[in-house]
Image (cartoon, rainbow, N blue to C red):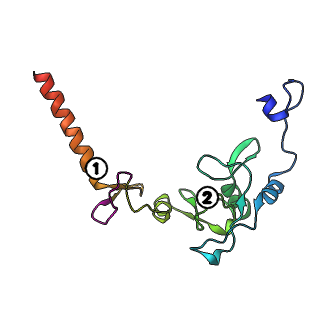
Amino acid sequence: MRWWYTGDVNPYVPLRRHSRDADARYAELADRDGPVPTARPDLGPCWIWTAGKNPGGYGTMSVSGRDTLVHRWAYERFIGPVPERLELDHLCCNKSCVNVAHLEPVTHQENTLRGVRRPYCKHGHEYTPENAAYHQNGSRYCRECGRRRSQAQYLRRKQLKEAAAA
């Protein structure tokens, strides 16, 4: 890791630390000429984070030695703290956007319901009002897949009972 940070394996070479504060890095690494969201052109252009991103696609940067989500840091820095039990929703549906005007604090359920929705489950069943059901946390699931899982579990247990009785 030392070579990764410094380009040298010598333990006497100090590790590189960010010489600029978080505000300067935010201003430098946020591309303010991003695309205008097609669904919400009234929001204006996205500010795309051009540096590191986490596996989910959200921009990250190190602040006080800790990796931080940039959109959350920016909201707390320029707007104020995110209210308790709420999370930030990207109104532009662009995970790498760090424009605080595109962020709104909402509940997890509201954020999930606003998300981009697939019309089919991973097994190809269409999400219709009769086939879609929702967990308490707001996530959606397919009732047909649930019925098939239950049926398969029932048959497995039945076979185990028959094998144990034989």
In depth, the one of 118 and 95 nearer the eye is 118
**Image coords of residue 40 (percent x, y):** 59, 75
Q: Amino acid at mark 1?
A: Gly
| Residue 128 lies within the magenta run | yes
CA–CA distance in space, label 1 to label 2? 30 Å
In depth, the one of 150 and 85 nearer the eye is 150
Magenta segment's dominant SS is: loop
Q: Which residue is mark 2?
A: 95
| Residue 137 lies within the magenta run | no
**Image coords of residue 119 (percent x, y):** 40, 63
Point 84% across, 44% down: residue: 18
Q: Extreme bottom residue here? A: 42
Q: Extreme front residue here? A: 124
Quadrant assignment, res 102: bottom right
Q: Which residues are magenta?
A: 122-132
With respect to residue 139, does 103 lie above or below?
below
**Image coords of residue 165 (percent x, y):** 10, 23
Numbered label attached to residue 146: 1
Q: Amino acid at mark 2?
A: Lys
Q: Say how many tags the image has.
A: 2
Quadrant assignment, res 129: bottom left
Q: Which of disc 2 and disc 1 is earlier in sequence? A: 2
Point 67% across, 58% down: residue: 71
Decide if residue 31 is on the left or right side of residue 91. right
Quadrant showing the C terminus: top left
**Image coords of residue 123 (percent x, y):** 35, 51
With respect to residue 99, does 11 lie above or below?
above
Decide if residue 5 is on the left or right side of residue 43. right
